[in-house]
């Protein structure tokens, strides 16, 4: 059974710091992996999607990497800003049907001015 | 384009009652997936609808049922509500193909008293 774990559960950093969020999964047979952002009480916004054949994806100050063989992904945020404060979730798609995504519990990030 | 629209935004029910949540997918999307997110947890997949049929289902009891209409909008019905059904219910839409970012609505916050 696929399980997704995110470490740390919470992270507080000063503004301007570079940071890394970690995601691990137990079954390497995935179709893709997505990183999402969630603001309190709101829906999810997809930040980056990495296909199983890819190693990384970049969007602005965000960079996500994927190592299928070791079951790990990282989300790197450069020059963090207070507006980056949110919960970040990773999710794996086992079949590519965009349906049964399996999520971690998320990392709650707080960026202090 | 309004993206994914969910209604209502908040709902309060009592144990044993029934509830219906609604979702309109993004224009051009034909696949709708529903997720339940308890406080402090990652979303859990309930089911996915495509061409008015349930295509995939997660590990949820039969009290959870759904429907998709010809215009691709969808409903989630929950019967015999339990206190544990209190959660944020999220709808996501896609075109159903593999490597595409999933688009989520803002969710319906259900409280069962």
Image: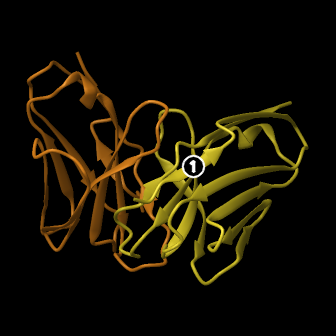
Image position of B103 with respect to B10: above or below = below
Which chain gets the orange colouring?
A: B
- Residue at 39 percent across and 34 percent down: it is B38
Query: In the picture provided, is A28 more to the left or to the right than B33?
Result: right
Question: Which residue corresponds to mark 1?
Answer: A5
| Residue B59: image location, x then y, percent | 24, 51
Q: Quadrant of residue B8?
A: top left
Q: Which of the two residues, B102 or B39, is positioned nearer the viewer here?
A: B39
Q: Report x, y in % for residue B14.
A: 16, 18
Extreme-bottom residue of the structure = A53
**Shade of chain A as shown in the rendered figure:** yellow
Q: Residue at x 21, y 47 (%)?
A: B60
**Type of colouring:** by chain
**Which chain contains the residue that carries disc 1?**
A
Which SS class for mark 1?
strand
How many numbered discs sit on the rendered protein? 1
Which quadrant of the figure has residue A99? Answer: bottom left
| Residue B36 occupies quadrant | top left
Q: Does residue B12 lie above or below A99 as drawn?
A: above
Q: Residue at x 55, y 59 (%)?
A: A25
Disc 1 crowd, CA 10 A, few/some/many (<14, 14-19, 20+): many
Q: Return the residue nearer the eye: B9 or B112.
A: B112
Relative to A79, residue B31 above or below: below
Q: What percent of the width, then of the height, locates residue B108?
A: 32, 37
The residue sitting at 42% across, 70% down in the picture is A94
């Amino acid at each position: 059974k696929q399980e997704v774990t995110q470490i740390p559960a919470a992270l507080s950093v000063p503004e301007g710091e570079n940071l890394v969020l970690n995601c691990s999964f137990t079954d390497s047979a995935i179709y893709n992996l997505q990183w999402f952002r969630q603001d309190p009480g709101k829906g999810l916004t997809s930040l980056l999607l990495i296909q199983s054949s890819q190693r990384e994806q970049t969007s602005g100050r965000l960079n996500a990497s994927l190592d299928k063989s070791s079951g790990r992904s990282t989300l790197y945020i450069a020059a963090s800003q207070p507006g980056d404060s949110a919960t970040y979730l990773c999710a794996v798609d086992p079949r590519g049907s965009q349906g049964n995504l399996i999520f971690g519990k998320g990392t709650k990030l707080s960026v202090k001015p | 384009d309004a993206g994914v629209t969910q209604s209502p935004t908040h709902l309060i029910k009592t144990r044993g009652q029934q509830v219906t949540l609604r979702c309109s997918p993004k224009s051009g999307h034909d696949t709708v997936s529903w997720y339940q997110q308890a406080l402090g947890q990652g979303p859990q997949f309930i089911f996915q609808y495509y061409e008015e049929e349930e295509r995939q289902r997660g590990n949820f009891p039969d009290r959870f049922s759904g429907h998709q209409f010809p215009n691709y909008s969808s409903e989630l019905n929950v019967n015999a509500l339990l206190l544990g059904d209190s959660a944020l219910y999220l709808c996501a839409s896609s075109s159903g193909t593999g490597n595409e970012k999933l688009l989520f609505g803002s969710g319906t916050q259900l409280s069962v008293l």
